[in-house]
Image (cartoon, rainbow, N blue to C red):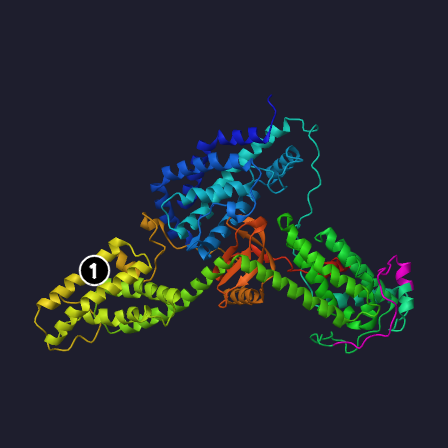
Amino acid sequence: MPPITPQSLVESVLSQAPQLARDVLDGTLARLEGRHQVKPRDTELALYFNLAEALRRLREPFVLALQERMVLELPAALQAPPTGLAHRPKPMVMLDELSLVDEQQALEDVAVAAAIRTIQEAARLSLQQLDTMFEAMRAGTAFSKRDANPLRPAVFARLLCHSLHALTLAPAARVALLRVAAEAMAEVLEPIYAGLCAQVNETDFTSLPAAPAAEPSMPIRDEVPTVPHTLDNLLRRMQQRAAEESTHPTPLSADALPSLDTLLASMGIAADDKAAEPRPPPELNRDFPPITPDAATDDPVPSTGAVELLSRVYDKILDDPILLPEVRNLLSRLQVSVLRVAVEDPQLLSQQEHPTWQFINCVASHSTGFNQGDRDRLQAFLAFVEGLVQRVAAEHHPHASLYWEALQETQQFIETSARQTVARTQNTIEMLERAQQREKWHGILRQQVREQLSQAVVSTTVRGFLEGPWVNAMAEAMVRFGPQAAQVQPMIDLVDDLLWSVQPLRHAEEREQLREMLPTLTARLQFGFDLINWPDSRRAELLDELMDRHSKLLRLPPDPRPAPSKMGSLADEDTTPSVHDTMDSLGASSSFWSDSMVDRGTLPTVPVPLATQDEAQLQATLEAWQRSLKPGSWCHMFVQSQWTTAQLTWISDSRNYFVFSGEHGAPPQSLTRGALLQLRAAGLLTELEDRNLVQRAVDTMMQDLNQ
């Protein structure tokens, strides 16, 4: 029997690609047509009917596209994955040369993530065995544990998504179809995975080398509910246990530092060798925000039991697997200082918002986001923190304000670094700022034009043009030249001029006025067309209609009667709306229907259930979260069908655009507000410090006590 290798297993799957693609098609149609054992819900019947009709018309292109993506992407998965979003060929909205993840792209990412979970759940046991086998085969290579399996669900979910991009479907219909097709693919892959496992079981892998230790990286943390004031609760639990055991810890006071040093020495904790000679306690600087104590009105005097508790908590902090070794070494030098703060300031024992804990959390959380590609930036941060740690640890009478100052300096360093990153991506920021301005002016101008049109009698073509493309042209002119520029006012005046030019003439003087206006009117139109690169066919359609209308007005004798006072059709015009007219009047340059040749298959996306909260409550929670984001924060997110860790470097004034620095030198990743909230609601975007270092240590201690 020939040896089994990753390549041979991939080739085995590729040999089944034609049948696999057809089985996925049949399974998808069976679900859409109600022939599968899992029936669609009543609310999905209309959607599934239209998707089925679309897929039946596109069945051959779908099968061909799916085969081609397997032939292309499965062998590519055998290669070490490139790093950074720059290498991911995913279509996105473009602002000039800026790639921007919008809400539609985020919805697609949510659907891909759901597809991955669907495939994983269908073949969990087989996948576990395959993952273990591939990790052993690729021991000592550049592959991470996550990427070792070239046949992992993420690869199939992405190639399925890419296959649907080859079809003439609108984005929303494509997302809806992806969710259904993922179920069919999971059903088809389950026996294939099982067959691969059978091949593996016939081979002896004892001769394969053991997988080497992985590089330090951020592990995926389980979510543990956070209880407010857990540190204080932990102290009370410890005191209660001490009372039950009839032990009475000896109280300590601020003048008992020699006793504290003796206690620490007995616990194996040595003070920093660089500590200064004892000196009178400095006057405390209370410039930091006041800390509200718990329900207890008076903080207890620290005792030997409290010191022992803090020491154990700090040991848990240092044992946290998320800490980089360099950060662990730095924080270990602060252990004695933290215990001394407890003697000076008992609030340290009851408040996790204490500046001491905030400083430790800040250092730990910020350093967590760096990866191997950011080594220079990490070393710069650690060198800065080294100076702060040395200064704090050298103080024999440390106090809260000392840590508050260190916290402020650290946050300032982080913000300065973020601004430097922004400076390196200035073109990206400028593009987003222009998009933000364009969005603001577009809303104002569109409302103004609608008010001007409210009593006008014009054709559907003219109405749609003024509400759509011309609003875009005016907004573009304001962004490009400035709202007070000489080029802008003539474009604004064109709305009234154009509306007047198509109304019946009442006097001979108006006929002459119209004749004189037409050349400048046409020139202003052409200027606006060029600003937004309006298609030549659309220009000709509008100009031909205006020419016909103006010619008729110039030939007809003036009509002294007042113009009609309500909206309606011009008697001498065909006002039947065309497809383009309807699109423009809705202001939808890329509507749900515009991308599809199969009208009945392009239905709006059925919302993916993102949470069990009430919709209003969920939206309020999401908005509160996004308002809490600030430059310098590290986030772990699923963008363009890939997990990545990136630092938030810029937020627009309107908070509608967010720029994240890319991994390993990749270009910055830009998200709209809608995309950010979609990913957050789906659990695909989270801050690395959602559960901070101190909280994790206290949670672990509480769990130990409960056991």
Which residue is painted at 58% across and 48% down in the image? 664
Taking the image as shown, residue 127 lies to the left or right of residue 176, namely: right
Specify the quadrant that holds the C terminus: bottom right
Which residue is painted at 25% across and 72% down in the image? 496
Give above or below for 115 relative to 398: above
Give the class, few, some or many, for how many residues have Cα within 10 Å of label 1's Cα (few <14, many ≥20): some
Image spot of residue 381 (x, y percent): 68, 58
Give above or below for 161 relative to 360: above
Secondary structure category for the residue under label 1 = helix
Towards the viewer: 170 or 94: 94
Image spot of residue 53 (x, y percent): 34, 45
Image spot of residue 35 (x, y percent): 42, 42
Which residue is painted at 56% across and 30% down in the image? 7
Point out the stretch of residues depicted in magenta. 262-285
Q: How many marks?
A: 1
Q: Which residue is mark 1?
A: 543
